[in-house]
Image (tube, rainbow, N blue to C red):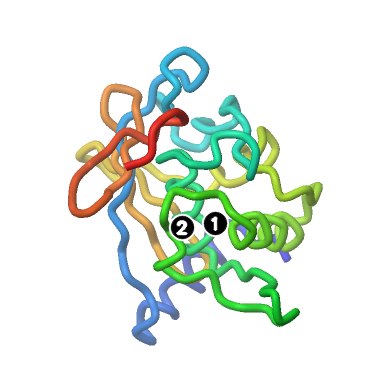
Amino acid sequence: MHLNKRNRLAMAAVSVAAGAGLAFAGLAPSAAATSRHVIDGYGNPTNDWGDEGNLSRYSYAHSNATRLWQTILWADGAKYKGSDGQWHDYTYGEIDGHFGKRTQSATKYWQSREGIYVDGVVGKQTFSLADNFLDHIGNNRVRYTGYDHLVNFKRLDGLYYVKVGGHWKKASYNYAS
């Protein structure tokens, strides 16, 4: 079920009002993922991520770029299928920078809910759809409007950063904090 930004915002507001939402300050500047190997973007955030590289269990599986994607999964209330065959909430604790089976399953869940090709790989189509829910909110901040949570990222000089242990780290494909 794909919802537009206004409906997502309403759902997020309800979650926050119910005590379910936490703002997660996460990313910063973005600058040419292919040239700098960091998630990047300039100008309108809704076209920042469509040119990003793939994230999967076999491609940049241990990275801060994966940590960024995991934050999106958490914000959207994604679920993963556990070894018990049951669906489980993708929790804030899952955000660890490791694209394992849970992240792959949650990515498939996200792709299915959004009505796009389901393969468990975060590629151009998946990133392009996710960035439709980004808004510039000033002071080098970009907000992702998730189904369950609003997530504030930081974008500085074209590079995105993710908050790791209270410190801003580049959302790099080649490095995990």
Label 1: few (<14), some (14–19) or many (≥20) C-alpha neighbours in 10 Å: some
Observer-nearest residue: 17 or 161? 161
Residue located farthest toward the bottom when viewing the structure as drawn = 18
What is the distance, in whole Å, between disc 2 and disc 1 at their CAs?
7 Å
Q: Earlier in the sequence, mark 2 or mark 1?
A: 1
Left or right of 62: which side holds 162?
Answer: left
**Three-letter amino acid code of the residue under disc 1:** Lys
Residue located farthest toward the front when viewing the structure as drawn = 83
Which residue is drawn at the image coordinates 38% and 87% (left, top)? 18
Residue 75: x percent and y percent?
Answer: 47, 63
| Above or below for 172 versus 4 | above
Tag 2, which secondary structure? strand
Residue 13: x percent and y percent?
Answer: 41, 74
**Mark on residue 5?**
1
Which residue is drawn at the image coordinates 65% and 55% (left, top)? 104
The picture quadrant where one finds residue 17 is bottom left
In this figure, which residue is indicated by the disc labeled 2?
145
| Above or below for 118 versus 78 | above
Which residue is drawn at the image coordinates 20% and 39% (left, top)? 139
Which residue is drawn at the image coordinates 28% and 43% (left, top)? 141
Observer-nearest residue: 70 or 150? 70
Observer-nearest residue: 43 or 20? 20
**Mark on residue 176?**
none
Tag 1, which secondary structure? helix
Left or right of 57: which side holds 61?
Answer: left
* In front: label 2 or label 1: 2
Left or right of 5: which side holds 94?
Answer: left
Q: Are marks 2 and 1 in contact (CB under 8 Å)?
A: yes
- Which part of the image, by quadrant, shows the N terminus? bottom right
**Three-letter amino acid code of the residue under disc 2:** Thr
The picture quadrant where one finds residue 89 is bottom right
